[in-house]
């Protein structure tokens, strides 16, 4: 696969994911903070759906020999510290590295500062990496996958993971229906509740 083809495929997949992200309203700061506070589960459902879809797609592509797997090495301290920093930042900013771009595109002015902060953090880490590498990038098992641990083909493990996620999503939807978290009038109804929802979004943008 040429670089140009890979870039075009990446752009197409990004456009589809961005469209789904916007339609699900997961990019909204209130939705993200609500998920971090366990107040709603829309964000978790969308991201787990993306993981399940990606697992099936990669299983097919890898099974037919179209792509090769290049797993990253596992480093326990780096994963734990990085996960805590990222989670704390998401809870405080109401955005993650992916949703902040959607927020900027839809007019949340405060998201510009979140984006600039993320870029500044990435630059700062690039300068600090030589000093942090001996501490954070040590003590891990290296490249490790569930397929290797189970002694099974990757496609089998990926499909099993996707099936488990789908079952979990079904159970989660039964427990917390998406309409309960988004409201009854998010399907285009122009009633009072929908108008109030839109007004709330507009006030959030103006406040930003």
Image (tube, rainbow, N blue to C red):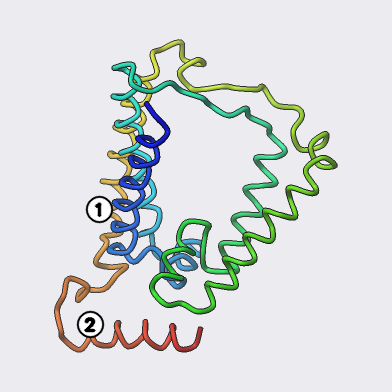
Q: Is residue 94 left or right of residue 57?
A: right
The residue positioned 30% from the left and 62% from the top of the image is: 24
Q: Number of callouts in the render? A: 2
Q: Position of residue 207 (x, y in %)?
A: 49, 88
Q: Position of residue 33 (x, y in %)?
A: 49, 68
Q: Residues within 10 Å of mark 1 (few under 14, many from 20)?
A: few
From what the image shows, is residue 44 above or below residue 190? Answer: above
The residue positioned 63% from the left and 29% from the top of the image is: 74
The answer to whether the residues at label 2 and label 1 have Cβ atoms under 8 Å apart is no
Secondary structure beneath disc 1? helix
- Residue 178 vs residue 129, the one in the foreground: 129
Marks 2 and 1 sit apart, C-alpha to C-alpha, by 24 Å
Q: Is residue 82 left or right of residue 67?
A: right
From what the image shows, is residue 41 above or below residue 55? Answer: below
Q: Is label 2 or label 1 in front?
A: 2
Which residue is the site of mark 1? 174
Secondary structure beneath disc 2? helix
Judged from this view, the residue extending furthest toward the right is 131
Q: Position of residue 177 (x, y in %)?
A: 26, 60
Q: Position of residue 96 (x, y in %)?
A: 52, 59
The residue positioned 35% from the left and 37% from the top of the image is: 54
Name the image quarter holding residue 164. top left
The residue positioned 70% from the left and 26% from the top of the image is: 140
Which residue is the site of mark 2? 194
Judged from this view, the residue extending furthest toward the top is 151
Disc on the earlier residue, 2 or 1? 1
């Amino acid at each position: 696969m040429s670089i140009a083809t890979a870039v075009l495929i990446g752009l197409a997949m990004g456009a589809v994911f961005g469209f789904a992200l916007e339609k699900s309203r997961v990019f909204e700061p209130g939705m993200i903070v609500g998920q971090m506070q366990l107040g709603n589960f829309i964000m978790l459902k969308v991201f787990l759906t993306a993981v399940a879809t990606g697992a099936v797609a990669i299983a097919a592509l890898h099974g037919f020999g179209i792509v090769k797997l290049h797993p990253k090495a596992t480093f326990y301290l780096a994963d734990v510290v990085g996960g805590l920093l990222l989670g704390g930042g998401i809870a405080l900013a109401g955005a993650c590295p992916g949703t902040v771009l959607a927020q900027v595109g839809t007019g949340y002015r405060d998201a510009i500062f979140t984006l600039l902060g993320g870029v500044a953090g990435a630059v700062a880490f690039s300068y600090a990496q030589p000093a942090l590498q001996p501490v954070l990038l040590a003590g891990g098992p290296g490249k490790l996958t569930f397929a290797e641990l189970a002694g099974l083909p990757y496609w089998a493990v990926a499909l099993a993971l996707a099936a488990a996620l789908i079952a979990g999503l079904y159970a989660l939807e039964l427990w917390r229906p998406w309409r309960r978290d988004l409201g009854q009038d998010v399907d285009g109804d122009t009633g009072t509740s929908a108008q109030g929802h839109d007004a709330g979004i507009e006030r959030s943008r103006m406040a930003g």
